[in-house]
Image (tube, helix red, strand yellow):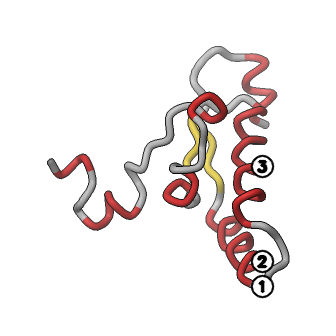
Amino acid sequence: MIQSVREHSDVPIAAYNVSGEYAMIKAAAANGWLNEQKTVLEILGSIRRAGADIIFSYHTPDVSPLAPIGKFGPVSRVNGPAARTGTGPRDS
């Protein structure tokens, strides 16, 4: 879907990595069935390669220190734990 939109449009494209997939990855990693870090980076990278300019994901707080800016673009924690607890940059 993202790739089709990208091929026919120059507008910024945002994608949402759904909460069910997030929960599935967390559970599989907790059971030792996969490497969480590698899996998450591959999923987010595939969304980016498909053409998304912006990715919304529950994985953002875990990935932001790992993501090289050149691979994913700037990573923001606006909707991460800091934003929910009132300790983020929006509160200053």
Residue ID at (57%, 24%): 12
Q: Amino acid at mark 1?
A: Asn
Above or below residue 13? Residue 23 is below
The tag earlier along the polypeptide, 2 or 3, is 2
SS at badge 2: helix
Disc 3 from disc 1: Cα separation: 19 Å
Binning the other alpha carbons within 10 Å of mark 2 as few (below 14), some (14 to 19) or many (20 upward) gives: few
Image coords of residue 30 (percent x, y) = 71, 82
Q: Give the residue pinned by disc 1.
A: 31
Residue 31 in percent (x, y) is at 78, 85
Looking at the image, which is closer to me, 80 or 6?
Answer: 80
Q: Amino acid at mark 3?
A: Glu
Identity of the residue furthest to the right in this view:
33
Residue at position x 53%, y 54% in the image: 60
Q: Amino acid at mark 2?
A: Ala
Q: Are marks 3 and 1 in contact (CB under 8 Å)?
A: no
Residue named by callout 3: 42
Q: Residues within 10 Å of mark 3 (few under 14, many from 20)?
A: few
Left or right: 73, with 51 as reference point:
left
Mark 2 lies on residue: 28
Total count of labels: 3
- In the rendered image, the vertical position of residue 86 relative to residue 52, given as above or below: below
Q: Quadrant of residue 36?
A: bottom right
